[in-house]
Image: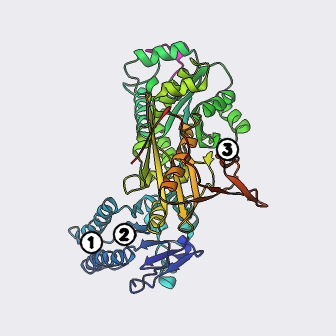
Amino acid sequence: MTTFVFRNQTVEPFLGYDGMTYSGYGDISMVSADADRYIWFYQVPVNADSIQLAEEIDSYRGKLDLVLSQTGDQKPFIVFSLVNLFPLRVTGDQTALDEAIAAFNGHVAQLSRERRHIKWIDFSEFTLRYDAATLINWKYYLMSQTLLNPKLTHDFQTWWHRIEEELALKRKKCVVLDLDNTLWGGVLGEDGIDGIQLGGDYPGKAYSYWQRSLLQLAHDGVILAVCSKNNEADVMEAWDKNAAMVLKREHFSAVRINWQDKVTNMRELAAELNIGLDSMVFLDDNPIERELVKQLLPEVVVPDFPGKPYQLMSFFKELVEKYFRIYSVTDEDRSKTEQYQANARRQAEQSRFTDLEGYLYSLDMSLDIIPADEHNLPRIAQMTQKTNQFNLTTRRYQESEVRQRLDDGWRVYCMSVSDRFGDSGITGTIFLEPVDDLTVNIDTMLLSCRILGRGIEEAFIKTVFNLLRLDGFRKVQATYLPTAKNLQTADFYDRMGMTCVNIGNDGAKHYEMVLNDVFELKNYYNIRVL
């Protein structure tokens, strides 16, 4: 990815050089049309005349608006908030500069709400970690126009890498929680339902704040699960009867409450949720349990748990910033807990049937095939970033890149799935690249792990094949690119009747198919093309 950076000082040490092109200081006369994305990294200059400086800050808004008018809406445009690294106030009533900075930052925040390709980054989140003496090295500034201290380069790049992951909507999927002295204070089996520390004064108040924060994390799309050595009946009673309990059974997508070792329980939780162990963060107050999981399940993130309840909120902030924050959440994220609980009910229902087809008929499944549009495009991009298991090529796209392919004439469909147990939301997508008037190439096909096991992937692609045939296409090309996680899809195109025409040295398999006949679909799917 190539990036063009608009700046008013030296920022190369922080953003790097590979794939980067930089404007002159304060120069907006050249706007690179070839860049894949743009960054606006202006900061407050050094000037003791706050009125003059405020006027300069006011001019940045017009400059930014002019640049945005030239770059269009198809490519990502990242704007750093303004931070005054060297606040200097001769008199207490000099507020013009602060007002100008606030006005610029408010303007950019509003733009980011109105135009999806504009992303507003709060630079103060980084700078507030340091005191004024650390932020600026005057020697470097006076010699090279580098206002931010170059000694902070490594810290900045670590922070910036996490910000780029947020923009790409990458994060861990699941928090797995112990209970005693982790979700609440004390040991349930010894202290009883009313004796555990939860609510009221400290330390119970700390655990209440902790539980409320975890609940908000669940509302924002992170899966909560339990892995605890305890008597399950005691825990269920505590969830039902302790009035101070914020997190109850319905807030957890999966639980393992037993006396089995936690490594086995973690593996079972990952299998039940159909997510990778590398998507999980395990929280336990017991260092022995943490070390066991670290040693035997190295893919799982196992942070050190705080030793005192008053440290829990700082710990929560650290967890969010390291593992769970993304730039924005989708409707599918917000309903994640309900979707996984619905999956558990589906699994229970399946056990009642002796044949798969009878079970599938009983689900009353509805599949909506929907062309990509501005409403569903963020979710489509998010799926390309997060989906690994049923993903034929594992190509990653940001919103702007999906939008660009639509402008280039590609067909992009997504699929929304629901049944009598609930709505799974948009859980599949396919990208079709036109080769010529009669041929398309499947660049990307993926499905969320939550809907696998019901033949939906076959119904999806066959419906798309039928749509292509109706639109006059007669040939489909496709590629399977193997990864460590998508081996279950290695023979998918073979099972769909496509012919493998070449296998590369890297294991990539290339397919073709002639669209002669209409594909028949099982009648236990209610399929709508919108």
Does residue 272 show up? Answer: yes
- x%, y% of residue 480? 67, 54
| Residue at 41 percent of width and 40 percent of height | 334
Q: Which residues are magenta?
A: 186-194
Mark 1 secondary-structure assignment = helix
Along the line of sight, the residue nearer the viewer: 271 or 220 = 271
- Horizontally, residue 152 falls left or right of residue 50, namely right
- Residue to which mark 2 is pinned: 84
Do labels 1 and 3 touch, CB within 8 Å? no
Q: Is residue 393 above or below residue 279?
A: below
Residue type (three-letter) at the residue carrying disc 2: Asn
- Answer with mark 2 or mark 1, whichever residue precedes in sequence: 2
Quadrant of residue 48 within the rendered picture: bottom left
Closer mark to the observer between disc 1 and disc 3: 3
| Residue at 57 percent of width and 14 percent of height | 231
- Residue to which mark 1 is pinned: 97
- x%, y% of residue 164? 51, 60
- Answer with mark 1 or mark 3, whichever residue precedes in sequence: 1
Residue 176 among those drawn in magenta: no
Do labels 2 and 1 touch, CB within 8 Å? yes
Along the line of sight, the residue nearer the viewer: 427 or 5 = 427
